[in-house]
Image (cartoon, helix red, strand yellow):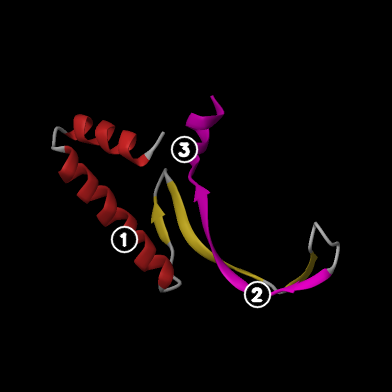
Amino acid sequence: MTKADFVKKLAHEIEVSTAKAESVLNTFIKHVTDVLKKGDKLTLPGFGTFLVTKRAARTGFNPQTKAKMKIAARKAPKFRPGSKLRKVIAK
């Protein structure tokens, strides 16, 4: 499903224009991004938790040349699904 498909479905579901639905979705994405940028986590009970994890520096290799290379430490976004979402998907 593309973002456009999702926006159309959302607009139909809540009976608003597609422009309004897209605005709502973009606002949600912006706020999740802002929370993660601060290093906080966002928990939506039953749905899941958006959080930031720290990945340690490590040694990797270039798959074409097999040369070793250092991969720097970084922060990465993560989504942990909630219990209700896991149950729906497991069916």
Name the residue: 29% across, 54% down: 28
Q: CA distance from mark 2 to mark 3?
A: 31 Å
Residue 75 inside the magenta-drawn segment: yes
User: Looking at this view, is 72 or 66 the one in front?
Assistant: 66
Q: Secondary structure at mark 3?
A: helix
Mark number, residue 30: 1
| Amino acid at the residue labelled 1 | Lys
Q: Which residue is mark 2?
A: 73
Mark 2 or mark 3, earlier in chain: 2
Q: Which residue is mark 3?
A: 85
| Amino acid at the residue labelled 2 | Ala
Side (left or right) of 18 relative to 7: left
| Amino acid at the residue labelled 3 | Leu
The percent coordinates of residue 74 (x first, y second) are: 60, 72
Q: Are marks 1 and 2 in contact (CB under 8 Å)?
A: no
Mark 1 or mark 2, earlier in chain: 1
Q: Secondary structure at mark 2?
A: loop
In this rendering, the answer to whether 30 lies above or below 45 is below
Name the residue: 52% across, 51% down: 80
Q: Quadrant of the N terminus?
A: top left
Mark 3 or mark 1, earlier in chain: 1
Side (left or right) of 47 relative to 4: right
Q: Which residues are magenta?
A: 68-91
Estimate how packed mark 2 is, as few (under 14), some (14 to 19) or many (20 or more) residues with alpha carbons within 10 Å: few
Q: Secondary structure at mark 1?
A: helix
Name the residue: 21% across, 42% down: 21
Mark number, residue 42: none
In this rendering, the answer to whether 24 lies above or below 41 is above
The residue sitting at the top extreme is: 91
The percent coordinates of residue 25 (x first, y second) are: 27, 48
